[in-house]
Amino acid sequence: MRAHHRLVSIALAVVASLAVPLGRPLGAQQAMAPSRPSRPVAIRAAHLVDPASGRRVDHVVVVVQGDSVVRVDTTGRMPNGADVIDLGDATLLPGLIDVHTHLSSESGNYYDDLFRRSPIDDAVRAHVFARRTLEAGFTTVRDVGGSAYIDVALRNAINRGEFPGPRMRVATLALSATGGHGDLNGFSPLLRFEGESGVADGVDELRKRVRENIKRGADQIKILAGAGVLSEEESVGAPQYSQEEMNAVVEEAAMWGRKVAAHAHGAEAIRRAALAGVASVEHGGLVDDEGIRIMREKGTFLVPDILTDVYLLEHAHELSWPEKIIEKERQLRGFQDANWSRAYRAGVKFAFGTDAGVYPHGLNARQFALLVKHLSLTPMQAIQMATVNAAELLGWSGKVGVVAPGSYADLIAVRGDPLSDVSELERVTFVMKGGVVVKR
Ligand SMILES: [Zn+2]
């Protein structure tokens, strides 16, 4: 999360009513209940992009029963008694995964967001963002921070089938040092926002915050390991937690079976996060050779959210971002492409995450073309980031990010060939989640 305009978490009486039944639904078990056919469904298309093998398969029939894929056939044989969805010369792909979203908010005017909106405003519109994301072809997201546990309520409502949205794994409140990226900086010292926030300092407070987040429904923990762009503290590269604090967070989260995602732009914050054993470094634009070496050794994922950086520079003035923030983004952008490319070539694992919510939800797929253009990836490599790689980061390999027997029937289709023009993924014509058609 780089936009912490809402991290100040204005306090609300409604927090209690938002924090609905917990437990730990994976989101994967219960897709939207209504209108899933009881008979098998055969989806026929000219092509299927298979990110697991890195190949394209032709003349494909995907057989779906209930919420899962039971067979992928290339003989052209249709199963008896199945309902048929014929997509003609379209290309099928597994439903896409964005591992860095903020579905419970969307940036507008900087000062309006801070002073004229509350988590109530966010809560009433979050379902719109969820639907938009799903209809854009993203059937799974890892949501990495939001206020007032809106993300928990959103995930649970989607799982109950109350409205359409992607499978969600949520982080609740992002952990931030006092004065750090998730704290309110640059305003009068007399200004106070009340309510629960993720601000925590020292090992004991951090362990307590991790436990509290999990108690409220967090599927993973998000820590702001270093400074950010969309906040007014000084250097974007500065670390904001000690090694000891980072280690404690990862150890505490692991004790509860949770992985940690670390926001870090700067080299030192990246090194500390990777050494502590986080599952992923978010942003990572100033990574150095030492950081690359540690991440490769530890199997740490890097999540380069280039779409947000490009969007911010294009729209910063119309959104009234302070000049200090725009200047930080400009500096950062000068280093990102070279550093990300070096990390990719060195063998660091990459997953597709966009920081959706900083830019308008539903445009997530615009990042594919940017990855191909600025990081010199092939379309298949960019697609793998949003499918098999992302699934591995989520711990859902074989269930999402693939079309194979036993996977969830999460499928999308596009008209053209995304392997020659990856921007085809911006024009998804068909979406199925868990065996239910949500867009055609
Ligand atoms: Zn973010």
Image (tube, rainbow, N blue to C red):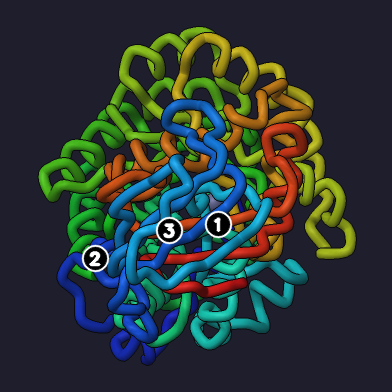
The residue identified by callout 1 is 412
Q: Residue at x 53, y 47 (%)?
A: 93
Q: CA distance from mark 3 to mark 1?
A: 7 Å
Mark 2: secondary structure? loop
Residue 91: numbered disc? none
Query: Left or right: 27 with respect to 226?
Result: left
Residue 428: x, y in percent?
A: 66, 59
Q: Residue at x 51, y 26 (%)?
A: 54
Residue 373: x, y in percent?
A: 78, 29
Mark 1: secondary structure? strand
Q: Residue at x 56, y 60 (%)?
A: 184
Asked if 68 appears above or below 298 in the picture, the reply is below
Asked if 183 appears above or below 378 in the picture, the reply is below
Q: 308 or 129: nearer the eye?
A: 129
Query: Left or right: 357 with respect to 300?
Result: right
**Residue 183 in sight from this viewpoint:** no
**Residue 84 in sight from this viewpoint:** yes
- Three-letter residue code for mark 2: Gln
The residue identified by callout 3 is 410
Asked if 324 appears above or below 215 in the picture, the reply is above
The reply to whether discs 3 and 1 touch (Cβ–Cβ < 8 Å) is yes
- Which callout, 1 or 2, points at the residue further toward the start of the chain? 2
- Three-letter residue code for mark 1: Ile
The residue identified by callout 2 is 29
- Which callout, 3 or 2, points at the residue further toward the start of the chain? 2
| Ligand 1 has an atom within 8 Å of the beta carbon of the residue at disc 3 | no
Residue 243: x, y in percent?
A: 31, 27
Residue 63: x, y in percent?
A: 37, 57
Q: CA distance from mark 3 to mark 2?
A: 13 Å
Mark 3: secondary structure? loop
Quarter of image, res 147: bottom left
Sort mark 3 into few (<14), some (14-19) or many (20+) by Cα contacts within 10 Å: many
